[in-house]
């Protein structure tokens, strides 16, 4: 297989030669207890006992050999986990960070509808670059601003579900907030609208550019004219389904269990324990969040105290500073070819310097300017921006971002070495 074909199967070569990463694509981050247990078994056998939780609600298995890849893919398929389009020029996993909000079942159903339509769809597997879609309950997280297409529920006068559609957002080296493409689009027109955008994107964008490049070239109004110039066909209204929501809907915040996982590095044993807890108390369903945690919703009548005790006994007491702080961390130079810094080590050093007030902030660190950890959406973000030569050899320099009034956090200090970075965060 060529590298391009491997990427369509959710596989990237790792920084270390002869090893690969397999990404497991989860719609809205949802995974069943049986599926989680299978991933835990595979992580224990092939991935050095660790499953990495991503900032888009997926799971990655690192340290796989070429010979492991077909075996792992077959084992994942046995429990209904398919990874087509998890990497490469295709529609990536559809995210939703709002599955504890009111109306979550409607959001979840839309996510799975989009996921089913585009996963493995050969019409949309030769895109110039990755294409990211998100569905959110509201705009408070700002995650709708970093997607190629994002859908946020809008007011409706006729009782039909409607969505405000945002387009052409993205982070990376040139962060651009998404713009409002169309207000109040009915749900039956969502899939046709996505298809129309994808056709326009593929036909008029040079690889490896994202949708934001095309919009930057032709302008928002021209892009809007091209994709909305003719009336959108609407698909027939879907009949209600018994599986409209796979997750139990929490009646209150206390019905929501969260296992904090520092740097997204979840042990195989830890994942297996969470699967067991989900089976006992949470309807057999788990959710990987964009903050690299695992969330479960208690089934009505389940014993909350007993569930919390089981969570604590499994090693998820959420007591240490590293467990309490929200700190998104990409793999960095630990495994990623693009990584400029050992992000897990830097993040641990940063946490050790944080006071109580700083621990209440959201943090993120990216090991390169691609910004996979979404540092511009954190209250305090760190980006390894470049390598420089000093007496110790080649060493990373860091930019420190702080959230302000703009759509994204902006760099407050740039070009810091590690000592300077730690001194800066200690003052926060």
Image (spheres, rainbow, N blue to C red):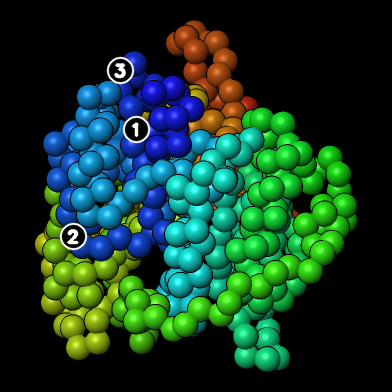
Q: Estimate the x, y position of residue 119 in percent, counting from the top left.
A: 46, 51
Q: Is residue 62 above or below residue 135?
A: above
In screen coordinates, is 7 left or right of 153?
left
Residue, disc 2: 34
Q: Is residue 51 above or below residue 359?
A: above
Residue, disc 3: 18
Q: Secondary structure at mark 3?
A: loop
Nearest to the observer: residue 73 or residue 371: 73
Give the quarter of the image for residue 186. Answer: bottom right
Q: Estimate the x, y position of residue 311 in percent, counting from the top left.
A: 18, 65
**CA distance separating discs 1 and 3:** 11 Å
Residue 91 makes an appearance in the image: yes
Q: Secondary structure at mark 2?
A: helix
Residue, disc 1: 21
Question: Where does the N terminus fall, quadrant-wise?
Answer: top left
Q: Which mark is residue 428?
A: none
In screen coordinates, is 79 left or right of 335?
left
Of the numbered discs 2 and 3, the one sitting upstream in the chain is 3
Residue neighbourhood size for the residue with mark 2, other residues' Cα within 10 Å, grouped as few (<14), some (14–19), many (≥20): some
Q: Is residue 307 above or below residue 387?
A: below
């Amino acid at each position: 297989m060529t590298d391009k074909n491997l990427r369509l199967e959710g596989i990237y070569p790792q920084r270390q030669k002869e090893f690969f990463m397999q990404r497991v694509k989860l719609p809205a981050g949802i995974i069943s207890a049986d599926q989680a247990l299978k991933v835990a078994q595979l992580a224990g056998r092939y991935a050095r006992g660790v499953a990495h939780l991503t900032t888009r609600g997926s799971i990655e298995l690192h340290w796989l050999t070429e010979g492991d890849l077909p075996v792992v893919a077959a084992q994942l398929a046995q429990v209904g986990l398919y990874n087509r389009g998890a990497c490469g020029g295709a529609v990536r996993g559809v995210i939703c960070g709002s599955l504890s909000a009111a109306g979550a079942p409607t959001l979840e159903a839309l996510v799975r509808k989009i996921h089913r339509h585009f996963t493995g769809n050969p019409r949309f597997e030769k895109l110039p670059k990755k294409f990211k879609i998100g569905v959110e309950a509201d705009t408070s997280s700002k995650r709708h601003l970093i997607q190629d297409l994002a859908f946020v529920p809008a007011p409706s006068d006729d009782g039909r579900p409607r969505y405000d559609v945002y387009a052409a957002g993205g982070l990376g080296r040139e962060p651009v907030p998404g713009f409002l493409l169309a207000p109040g689009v009915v749900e039956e027109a969502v899939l046709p609208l996505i298809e129309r955008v994808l056709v326009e994107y593929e036909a008029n964008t040079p690889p490896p550019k994202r949708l934001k490049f095309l919009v930057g070239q032709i302008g928002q109004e021209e892009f809007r004219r091209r994709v909305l110039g003719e009336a959108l066909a609407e698909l027939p209204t879907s009949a209600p389904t018994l599986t409209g929501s796979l997750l139990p809907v929490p009646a209150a915040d206390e019905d929501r269990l969260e296992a904090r996982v520092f740097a997204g590095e979840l042990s195989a044993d830890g994942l297996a324990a969470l699967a067991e807890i989900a089976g006992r108390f949470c309807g057999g369903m788990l959710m990987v969040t964009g903050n690299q945690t695992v969330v479960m919703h208690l089934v009505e009548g389940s014993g909350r105290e007993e569930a919390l005790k089981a969570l604590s006994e499994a090693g998820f007491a959420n007591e240490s500073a590293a467990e309490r702080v929200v700190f998104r961390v990409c793999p960095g130079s630990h495994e990623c070819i693009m990584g400029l810094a050992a992000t897990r080590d830097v993040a641990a050093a940063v946490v050790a310097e944080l006071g109580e007030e700083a621990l209440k902030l959201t943090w993120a660190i990216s090991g390169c300017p691609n910004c996979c950890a979404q540092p511009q959406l954190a209250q305090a973000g760190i980006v390894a921006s470049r390598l420089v030569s000093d007496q110790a050899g080649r060493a990373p320099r860091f930019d420190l971002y702080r959230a302000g009034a703009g759509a994204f956090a902006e760099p407050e200090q740039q070009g810091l070495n590690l000592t300077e970075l730690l001194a800066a965060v200690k003052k926060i």
